Amino acid sequence: MARSTPTYTPVRNYAIGFFLSACLLFTDISYGTFAQLRGFFHSSALYAQIISDGMFENIGNAFSSFQKNKFLLQENKELRDQILRIRTQDFIERKDNQEKIQIIDFYKTLIGKLKNDDIDIFKIASIDLRNYLCCSTHKIFLHNPNHVQAGENTPVFAGNSFIGQIKNTYMSFIEVILFSDITHVLPVRSDLFYCDARGLGKPMLISCHLDKNNDTFNNQIGDIVYTSGLGGIFLKDIEIGFISDINRISINEIEVVITLKTNPLEETFYGIMSKKTDEI
């Protein structure tokens, strides 16, 4: 509770306080009574100042180091991104160069095989793999970004042999039906027979049905099979595959199974002759 009137302090109390203060001051000046105490306070103040200066300096250095590390991390990230772009560009250029070399070599192969330099080369776009591995419909699609005019039924070459014919062209793609498609028919020959080989609906397999009583048939497994040239679509005497099996179908009929030479799953580039060959 606050006081209602001021408290009275006797004059003698002020006099006693003044006298004691004067005595302490006199003894300190004359004899240095409080010198150690003053030194202690001065030392404490000095140590506190040194410690605080050190703390502020460390905080400043830490902040500066943090800023520097942040800058270095950003610079390092930019350098990594730049290196990645350079590596990616280098990979693309090397791949492009490799593809150019493959195209040149393939073009030379086509000229040697087909005796014709009027050839367009296309890169594969996709293959209907599900049907190719399990079912009767076998086809691939080729990129045609320049919309090259390719006639229906034109032969398609890959690797070292023919692999099929053009079935359709639309937008920027060419649809190719493969020899192994069950609806495809290819005139072939061996050294002892001619036949129209049909696709078996199995990867890389076609077959001929022949008269078992044919006295001229004496082929063995492993014998080479060529295009016959009949029909005027495929050049003759292009190696197409080899006899891989001979099965008896009935008393008078046998099936000659032919394994094709070129595997479309292993090829990247395909050649198409711009002009059809004449019937031979």
Image (cartoon, grey):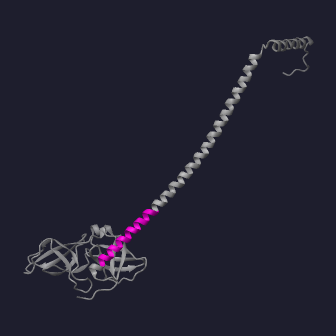
- Residue 125 visible (yes or no): no
**How far across and how far down the image is residue 187, in percent?**
21, 81
- Choose top left, top right, bottom left or bottom right for residue 143: bottom left
The C terminus: image quadrant: bottom left
Quarter of the picture containing the N terminus is: top right
> Which SS does the magenta portion mostly show?
helix
Which x, y percent locates residue 188? Answer: 20, 80
Residue 54: where, in percent of width, then height? 66, 33
The residue shown at (37%, 75%) is: 122
Give yes or no for residue 98 being in the magenta stretch: yes
In the image, is 169 to the left or to the right of 204? right
Q: Quadrant of residue 145?
A: bottom left
User: Which residues lie in the magenta part?
Assistant: 89-110
Q: Is residue 69 above or below residue 189?
A: above
Which one is nearer the viewer's eye here, 13 or 223? 223
Give the total number of marks visible in the rendering: 0
| Pick the front one: 53 or 232 | 53
Q: Can you say whether 169 is above or below 18 in the image?
A: below
Q: Would you say residue 48 is visible in this rendering? A: yes
Q: Is 7 included in the stretch rendered in magenta?
A: no
Q: Nearer the viewer, residue 272 or 170?
A: 272
* 280 left or right of 169 in image: left
Q: Is residue 145 left or right of residue 258?
A: right
Q: What residue is shown at x 31% (from left), y 70% (from top)? A: 267
